[in-house]
Amino acid sequence: MNAFFASSESGSGSYWYAPPASQVAGEVFWLFDLIFWISAIFFFVIIAMGGFMVVKYRRRPGVDAQKTDNHNTALELLWSVIPTILVVAFFWFGFDIYMSLKRIPDDAYRINVIGQKWAWSYEYPNGMISNMLVVPQGRNIELVLSSNDVIHSYSIPDFATKMDAVPGRYNRLWFHAENVGEHQVFCTEYCGDGHSTMLSRLSVRNQAAFDDWYETESNFMDSETLSPVDKGKKLYGIHGCAACHSLDGKDNVAGGGPTFKGHWGTTRSLADGSSVTMDDNYVRESILRPNAKIVAGYPKDRMPNFEGRLDDREIAALIQFIQAQTEGK
Amino acid sequence: MSSTATETAHDAHHFHDDQAWHLAHHFETPHQQFDSGKLGTWLFLVTEVLFFSGLFVAYGVYRMTRPELFTYASGYLDTKMGAINTVVLIFSSLTAAWAVRCAQLGNRKGLTINIVLTLMCAAGFMVIKYLEYSHKIHIGLFPGAPAEPGQESMWNFNPEWAPGEKVHFADDPNAPALHDLKNFFGVYFCMTGLHGIHVMVGMGLWIWMLIRNLKGQFGPKFYGPVDFVALYWHIVDIIWIFLFPLLYLIRH
Amino acid sequence: MGQHTRELSNGTFTYELDSPNDSYLVHFKGIKSWLLTLDHKRIAINYLVCISIALLLGGIYALLLRLDLWNGGLTATGEVDPNQSKLLTNDQYNHAFTVHGAVMTFLVLIPGIPAILGNFALPLMLGAKDVAFPRLNLLSWYLWVSGLICFLYTLFMGGLDTGWTFYTPYSVTTNTSVISALFGAFMLGFSSILTGLNFIVTIHKMRPAGMGWFEMPLFLWSLYATGIIQLLATPVLGITLLMLIVERSFGLGIFDPAYGGDPVLFQHFFWFYSHPAVYVMVLPAMGVISELISTFSRKPVFGYKMIAMSSVAIAFLGFLVWGHHMFTSGQSPLMGTIFSFITFSIAIPSAIKVFNWLTTMYKGSVALNTPMIYALSFLGLFGIGGLTGLFLSTMATDIMLHDTYFVVAHFHYVMVGGTIIALLGGLHYWWPKMFGKSYNSLVAKTGGILVFIGFNVTFFPQFVMGSRGMPRRYHMYLEQFQSFHQWSTIGAFILGLGMFMAAGNFIWSLLRGPKAPVNPWGASTLDWKTATPPYYHNFDVEPEVRPGDIYHYDRIVPNPEGPGFVEKKRDAMPAETGAKH
């Protein structure tokens, strides 16, 4: 039913929102417009009534207020019943469209989304992990959201949908990616320091382009054209290292991560007073047991533990990549 | 009781009646004052019930999601101690009610005896609570500040410290995961701890009433404060009457 | 000094009072007499001073946030743009918005109108000498001050970056000073409970003989409804904060998913209080508006009973809607549906109130004095705040708008456009009675209009960026939102200017203001029948009130000999005595 109403609006944006990227989003925006215009009429009535009273009955010398009825049942019923009918209508449309946001089609393509301070990562059916959400065009996509630390929320404004990623439970959302294009993703539940940069891009590609991307990404560790440093760079992106460890030489002390540029081979003094040389063994240990040796000034417990999440080949690639940042290989 | 130009002049009106000075200046009649106090006390008790309701809801939610954990963990509580405490508190409610009656009748001696009895029950309750808590601490079922997040150090429950209490977790196929006990004992310590704080506040109030009684302030025309403290005491009692079965009596 | 006699049920008593002709402001002297006062009027002034300080603190943080948000710092695709400088770091920004939110909510909005205007006017409106429990009243002020001290302690001991909502698990894991802040909010909660309890008992037990329930001024009805919420909802906040304190200090696993706890349960507890708290803020504001519109139109409030009952209805329904804060948290669609439906039902009593206020002015004699300017801007701003609430109670559009700037704009329209505007309006209304001094009305009106304009320039653009997807609590933002943010920043400074004009005018009035008449606005309620400023014991002679006096302006006529209004004597056989509403 709502598709009918929405059809006129679907596909075009307005001052209030960008063009909807799916049919459900079009329905949501249609409902937004409906409430907007009815509210605008109500607001106009309130302002007009107020303005009329103030001007017409302004205080004038020698003229006092006139006696009128102190209440009027018919009138009061009128302005109780009309809003009641309207809000019941809003409720109904809201409920109806909400259910289509909630009812996940059986054939949906499932991707696990993991929120972690302060990056999103995506786990595809074959176990491939990406830091960018790429989906095939024309498919129903189901995202299963979870969180490794605090509550995050996954918001895609163009699809008019949003769902919290809560530690300890799985929340789901779905959308239908109609057209090829790029969409912005935000984290909308406050999660600390990097909350406002916990952004992600959603890329809808046609089936062939998607398959191509999927194939390359799934097997990049086996790639013969990529150097270990390039592989390390990809891992750096996938595992969210960029959220804390910059490559531009600026240490992010408050946020918890030293930069990867310029520290290799130097002696680092630790929080407990001892010191260590930043070499491959130190980096390996820090990846697997982040709290073991913390450089003085940096907070504890900030970096997630990657033991079991990275294999030796991947750690080696990462180490080479980190080394390359300083030595410029 | 002279009218001086200070803020305490509020109560300082010269009445001919020996107890009428208790009428605060802003009330018209002692009756109005008593009614206001009573309504205020009841409203306060409503907030007390809602204050505990949060914990009851937390209890309900987690017991619903983890029924087996709750019945299992409840086995670590000492039902005998809990039962004794229940009897002690119910008895103290009787003496509290009796105290009000004595105040109404102007029986100063009876009022003193009943307040002292109530205080002794309250102290007894706290002692038993102390024994229970220290036992939990001894066997490690007590939370502490985490030494290292992610470590189990605050829940270093060691079954060998509590021989005969329960079979070793590793040997018991029905035992829930060790750290899951935390959920039950979190609720347990919050509920009984908050209740214990209320008992101690109540003891303070009773001591205050005792002092005022020894000064001869209460009588048939003025017994409101005793009445209000007794009402508070009953609510503390009632809350325990719910806590006892919910925490102690749910094991198989 | 004089001998007074009183007939009490158990005899006739004679007692002495200090000279009743002293105003409460000067009757006792010295700082101690203010700190230990049991007089409701002085406690109201104490609150006024302290809440103003808190408002200033929260306001400074607001301006700091707005200045920082002048630049977004990100390009259109989310890369850091080195050309855009930011005033604060992410961390500082997070602290700043938390302090702004926590101070404004717990220290200003929730106590604001009941503690300042309610404390001052409630006993006066009842013709009573004080609230039922003056010591409790003083205690709740001290609890408020302790809450403020806890918050200040938090500020200096590592700050707070959880947002005012304290969501777990973030609040359990952050290394800022959460416990002291929670403890502060806990004490502020108790301050609020005691105020509500005091007001309810006072209204029940201390109404004068001639004033039935439906002859009370509507401000008292709204405070009564507010008191119910304060009593029934605030304890749940108390226990929630306590559980969080225990969880954080001892590691109890109540909200920790690693131990079978549920962070969403915290949200349920939190909003079970914090949604009704919205009505703790707004209901008294509505009460003030009822007084203002009736007085400045010289007309009885239209549909008095409907307005009174709608306050109670809002208080009741307000308890059943907390789940609408969690449409995206993963609660079941059934629960979402129920909460959405009940939420809509609150729109009805609110709509009734707005239309009744508008109709009150019909065929009245509408004077645009400063308080009325605020009342009218309340109607406009609260109208927008309420209507945008419709978008958020509709489930489908809430999913789109949840946690965006649309929500930020919505609740600022309700909280600032509603509560703060009504607080300012009420202050301008009762100010002459409180201090016996008039303020400059031209400056006051200009300030009021600047507040109105500045407020709209600040918050209207936020609706648009919100519906376009801009999330709240964002320090860095994408380029496409920048123009909205910049408008918002400009507006915030206009708003600030308006507030400073109002404050400066008040201070000027204390120092230089001309003496105010006893009844400057021609109001009909009992609070205007005492001296200006009121006697220490409120009334020299207990004021006579008959059914039909309140909100009837026939006998209140302009003072022929000076400013303000005077009351004509009753006719020999008053015809309206029997006329009830």
Image (tube, coloured by chain):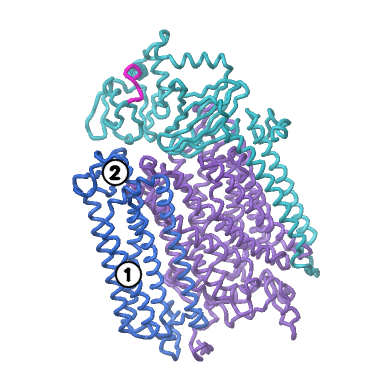
Chain colours: A cyan, B blue, C purple
Q: In x, y percent, where is residue C325?
A: 54, 46
Q: Which residue is at the far top?
A: A224
Amino acid type of the residue that numbered disc 1 sits on in the rendered structure:
Gly
* Magenta highlight on residue C106: no
Identify the image quadrant of the N terminus of chain B. bottom left
Relative side of C335 to C555, left or right? left
Q: Which mark is residue A296?
A: none
* Mark 2, secondary structure of its residue: loop
**Along the line of sight, the residue nearer the viewer: C383 or C271:** C271
Whole-percent x, y for residue B140 in the image: 24, 48
Residue identifier under label 1: B204
Asked which quadrant contains residue A262, the reply is: top left
Amino acid identity at mark 2: Pro
Say above or below: C562 vs A308. below
Q: Is residue A309 magenta?
A: yes
Give the magenta-colored segment's residue range: A308-314
Marks 1/2: CA distance?
34 Å
Give the farthest residue toward the front: B252
Residue topped by disc 2: B146
Secondary structure type for disc 1: helix
Query: Would residue B207 be found to the left or right of residue B223 on screen?
Result: left
